[in-house]
Each structure stands twice: as C-alpha cells, then as structure tokens.
Image: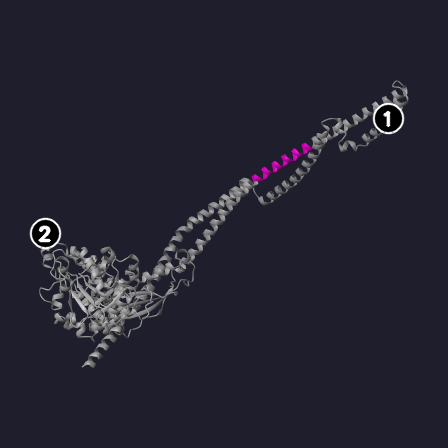
Amino acid sequence: MMESKMRPKNQLDLSAQTQGFNPFDSQEIDLEDNKVDLVYYWRVIAQFKWRILLVAMLVTVLVTLVLFSMTPVYQSTGTLLVEGKQNTLLSIEEMYAMDTSRTEYFQTQFEILKSRDLARRVINKMKLAENPEFKKKDSEDAKPFWKEWLAEIPGLQKPEEDDAQKKAEAREEGLLEVFGKRLTVKPRPKTQLVDVSFEATDPVLAKDIVNNLGEAYIDNGLEARMDNTRKAAEWLSSRLQSLKDRLATSENKLQDYLSKEHLVDLEGVMTLAGKEVERNSERLANARQARLEAESTYNKISSGVNNAELVPEIIGDKGVQDLKSTEAELSGKVSELSQHYGPEHPSLAAAKSELANIRVLLKKQIISIASGIKNRYEIAKTNEESVLASIETNKGQIQDIGRKQTRLRELQREVESNQRIYETFFNRFKEANEAAEIGSSNIRFVDKASQPIAPIKPNKRLLIPLTFVAMLFLGVLIAIYLDYLDATIKSPEDIDKKLDRPFLGAVPFIADMKDKEGAIGTYLSNNPRSSFAESIRTIRTGLVLSALDSDHHIWMVTSSFPGEGKTTTSMNLAESLAQLDEENRVLLIEVDLRRPTFKKRFNLPARSLGLTHLLAMNAQLEECVYPVNNTRLDILPAGMPPPNPLELLASRAFVKLLDDLEKRYKYIILDAPPVNAVSDAQLLAQHVRSVIYAVKSDSTPVKDVMSGLRTLERFGAPLAGIVLTQLDVEKINRYGTGKYSGYYYYQSAYANEQDDAQN
C-alpha cells in the first residue's frame, strides 16, 4: 500500500513544471538574471532616506563649523622660464655644460627649486626664523623630571655648547621641513615654464617668499656657471703647455723621418711604379700568349715527323710545298714505269733513286722547320719568365713605397691632430678668460608673484557642498551594505534574488491575532474581506491551478523553525479550500506530533482523540476527526504526544490511512514539523503532491531556509512554492517599488473598501 502511494518519477517531473505557477507573474519577467536590479536598490535607499539625510546634514554642519574656525591660508604663485638653450656670447659652455635639451635637465632644475640649500638661502635672507608664522614652541624648555634626574648623574651631563648646537640644528631642520611642505613646484606640460607657489597665512609673506626664491634660484644657477667657467679656464691653462710640447715632438718626428728616408715626392714615385706594373702586365699577357702558341706547335712536332707534317707552319712552308710537288711527280713516274718495266730496269731504278733523294730532302726540311719552332718556343718561354721577374720586382718596390707612405701619413696625422687640439684649447682658453668676466643665465621670471586676494584654504564653497554630497553617497553605500549583510527574507523580491525558488504568495502580519489565539483558525471566515484572507485565497488559487492535471491533492506545509506561521497558514489555507468546493470536504491533519497546537487553536476538548489514537490505539476515524462549524473543513489533530513520533509516521498504518483519507477528501493539508528541527518532514514529503514552505518575513536567515529546501530536495520532495508569512504590507507599500508592491497596494485598498462597505 505504501508503494502504491509513492509518486512516480514522471509525475514528479510534471509537478515540478506546474509547481512554479505564480499568480503575480502577470508582469513581464523575461529580464536577464545578471542584470542589476536598480529598482530593488532604490527601494533600499528609500527605506533609509531620512537617516541618510540626517547624518549628511549633521556631518556637513560639523565640517562647516570646523572650516570657519580654521585660519585662512593664502597662496602666491610666480612663473619661471627655464630655457633649454642658453643665449651665450661665447661657446665655452660646450666644454662643461650639460645637455640642456634633454628631459633630465628640466627635471633636475625642478628638483633644485625644491632643494634644501635654496630654501636655506631664502630663510636666512628673509630671516624667517624670527617670523611668528615659522616659530615653533621650544618643547625642550620644560624638561621632564626624568631628564633633569638623568642630568644630575655624573658622566651623563653634556656640555651646554653641544646642547645649544643641537637645538640650533633641530630648529633649522624644523624650518626647512615647514618651508618644504608649503612650497609647490609644478611644471607646465609641454612648455619650459614652471610655476612656483608658496602657502602662508600672510599674503604679503607668501608673495615675497616666491619672488626671493626665484631670484635665489637664478643667482644660484649663474654662480654655478661662473664657477664652472673659472674652473675651465684654469684647467685649459694647465693643459696648453703639455699640448704645445706634444705638437713640437710630433713635428720633429716627421722631419726626422723625411730626412732619413730621403723622401721628397712619394706620390709621384708611387704613380711611376704603378704605371710600370701596368706596362709589365701587358707585356706578360703578350709573352704568355706567344708562349702558349709556340708551346702548342712544339707539342705537335715533338711526337714525330709524321705529326709534324700536319702542323700548319710546316705545311705552309714554300720549300716543303715544292718538295711535296716533286715527290708527287716522281711517285707518279715510278708508278707509270713500274707498269712497263721490270724492277731492275735502269729507268725505273733511276726514278726510284730520285724519289728517295727528294724524300730525304723533304724530311730534312721538316726537321729544320721544327727546330725553328722549338727555338721560338724556348724564346717565348724565356720572355715570359723575364716579364714575371720584372713584375715581382715592381711589387716589392710598391710595397716598400707603401710602407714608407703609411708611416709618413701616420706622422702627418699626428702632427695635424696635435695642431688642431692645441688651436682648440688655445681658443677656448681665450674664451674662458673673457667669459669669466661675463655672466648670462637661461632662467628668468616670466610672471613674478603677486599678493593673493582670496585664501585657498579652506575652500568653503567647495568643501561644504562636497561634504554633503559625499556623505549622501557614503550613506547610500552603507544602506546597500547593511541590506547586503541582512541575511533574512524581507520581501517577495528577496525570494527571487536570494533563494531562486518559486514564490507562492505572502501572508500579511495581523497585529490582533496574538491577542485572539483561539480565533486564529477561524480568522479567514471571520474576516473574509481582509488582506489576510485575500492573500490566503491567492495561495489557494496557485495550488489548485498547479494540480488540475492530477488527482493527488495532498499538500504539506512546513518551515525551517517553529514560530514561522506554518500552522496558521495551513489552517487558513485548508479553510479557504473548503470554501472553494461545496460538494467535497477538506481535511487538515496535524502531523506535528511533538508540539501539537490544534486543540488550543480550534478550542477542542482537552481529551480529544487524534492521529496517534487512530494509528496506535485502534481508534475509529469518526472519533478522531472534528468538523469545523459552518464549513466543509474537517481537522485531524495530533492527539496524545507519542514517545516515537517518527516511527509512527513511518508505519504502514499511516500510509494506509492517507490512502483511505484521499478517497474520502478532495484536498488534504498536512501541518508538518519544521524541517531543520526534526526529520519528520523529510519522511512526510514522500507522500504528498508538493510542499508549501513557510518563511517568516524579516526573521529567518537565508542560509537556514536554503538548508531546509536542500534537505527536502534530497528526499525528492517537490516544492509548490514559498509562502512569506507575517509580512509588513505597509512597509512594502511605503518603500517598495518592485513587481509585487503594486499588488499589495491594490490588495490593501480592496480590503479597506470592503470594510468600509460593510460598515
């Protein structure tokens, strides 16, 4: 039977889709979750507005009193021009001045304006130590008793001179510190101008200090330049003699070298040697070409006479050609005679003898020509070697001349360099002597300081309104921070923002309920036109609409802790459901067996039976169920508190009882124990359609509500929605600007109109 009443998984999913129904969601709620809810923060500010205004006004008044009690401070400003390039008459500055076009130069000048040495000059010149504004009370005049006691100890006493010197040094340090704090040096961007300002209670004193500081700065720069000029002149004077000696030494070395090497015109000699090398190079090319040609011809004839006959020079020789012609004629004659005569014929023998002689002569002629070719080859080879030797001789001469020329130029450069250096130093020495008597500065006043008319401190026109605005802003931040620290649910908007769970409705706080606890259960029927009754009917509508597709109409009402209004909500919700249907009855079961309250709330008899009697003592259902007068509502109280309430609710008898009751009643409401107090609600949640979670407005911490909701979700309990109980509707209507505030304004107005109509 218990398993038959357990809700199937798919039915739980369908319930989860419908349980988020909210009758207040008629407005558009498609805003993105990550958007900042400015309306919500405006409501928070409106809630704290009078306190924010009060604190802002009080602080502003205090600041105003303080400002009017302060001594006014005046500021005088003068403008100096620090030029990057100095207009000097002489160029000696190039020797010792820094690069004034660099950014570091200007930064250095700005720091010099704030230097202690410059401040000390102004203090001494204007005798500021005697000025009342710069005087400090001598705290050491009244020595503590322990200092006097230590002074009497032998060995610890200090000379009075040392003590006076330390006092003077401390006083000077104090003056410099005060002077530096009041001085402001501010360069103007992208210019060479710098503004120098000084603050003082006396406007004339402020003006004089700025002007004296500027003049002291100009004098300081001029003195530094003059001192550098004198130092440069002294250094140049000491260097001139050594440079002169060095120049003389280098000139003597050059003259000695020219005499030793007998050098007059190295450039002309080098030119002649170069031309000789060019001519020899041309000769070498011609000789090499002739040698190659002779060598080629010689190589052909060196292999034999037969090959020699193929040489063009031999073939083209006139004698060879004639002998060749004669040889050809005799060869033809011998051939002709051989056809007619025998080998021993005298004519044939004579012809052959003549042919042999001609051939011997031809060979001798060829050998003679070949010998001439060989001689020509030897001569060409000898000529080439001779030209090569001449070129090598020329190279040596050129190298020797080059070495002498290099040494000569080195000595000449040394003389020229020493000459230039000497002349430069000599000119600079003359310029330095002249510049020592002339001084010019690249720093000057553009605007001298004038006497200020209005004080700069305190700026009352700015500080008073700024204080008021700042305190308003700070008050708004504190209000928002306090709202952030408040970890309770105060309004329906907090349910959306802090819990992210469906909102079912809100039950307003009714002050006279506490005085009439016996009538709490019938408050709905006794006050049908009240805002309380209207809110209960709204919750009822959401539940009924969410269960249109199901026959399982058992709901459980629970909360995080006792005293959050869950019982009041369940009682009046059950009565509202009973008014909805005139044919079926509604049952309200008190399953909070540990702390039952139905007897007192519904004025039941002291020994009335209830759920424990029905489950554990075999009592009849008719004996334990009590109808509410003039309604279709029946209640089943807890009865006698049992020793083991959890085991009793987990029994099969309880499951069977719910099954039987669901057949008799259309709607069943279970008033369950708090979730965070006991574990009964987790067990009961498995037998209901959904859970109604009651949260007391501006009371229950968010973490406890989330803990209870997570516990129910862990046991598979579907959530119908959250009911916000004991809500201060007037506060919501006064400060609220959220999507629910308009409804409560309308609801309260409607209830008031109905009460007026009844009266």
Amino acid tagged 1: Leu
Residue 93: % across, % down: 40, 58
* Separation of marks 2 and 1 at Cα, in angstroms: 157 Å
Q: Is residue 698 visible?
A: no
Q: Residue at x 22, y 56 (%)?
A: 2
Image quadrant for the C terminus? bottom left
**Is 720 rendered above or below residue 255?**
below
User: Toward the viewer: 173 or 321?
Assistant: 321
Q: Return the residue at label 1.
A: 330
- Please tell me the numbered disc located at residue 95: none
| N-terminal label among 2 and 1 | 2
Image quadrant for the N terminus? bottom left
Question: Residue 733's image quarter?
Answer: bottom left
Amino acid tagged 2: Pro
- Please tell me the numbered disc located at residue 154: 2
Q: Is residue 151 left or right of residue 389?
A: left
Residue 15: % across, % down: 29, 62
Q: Which one is in front in this view, the residue at disc 2 or the one at disc 1?
A: 1
Question: Residue 315's image quarter?
Answer: top right
Label 2: few (<14), some (14–19) or many (≥20) C-alpha neighbours in 10 Å: few
Is 32 contained in the magenta span?
A: no
For the record, the magenta segment spans 380-400
**In what element is the residue under mark 1?**
helix
Q: Is residue 86 visible?
A: yes
Is 391 contained in the magenta span?
A: yes
Residue 508: % across, % down: 20, 71
Q: Is residue 642 left or right of residue 577?
A: left
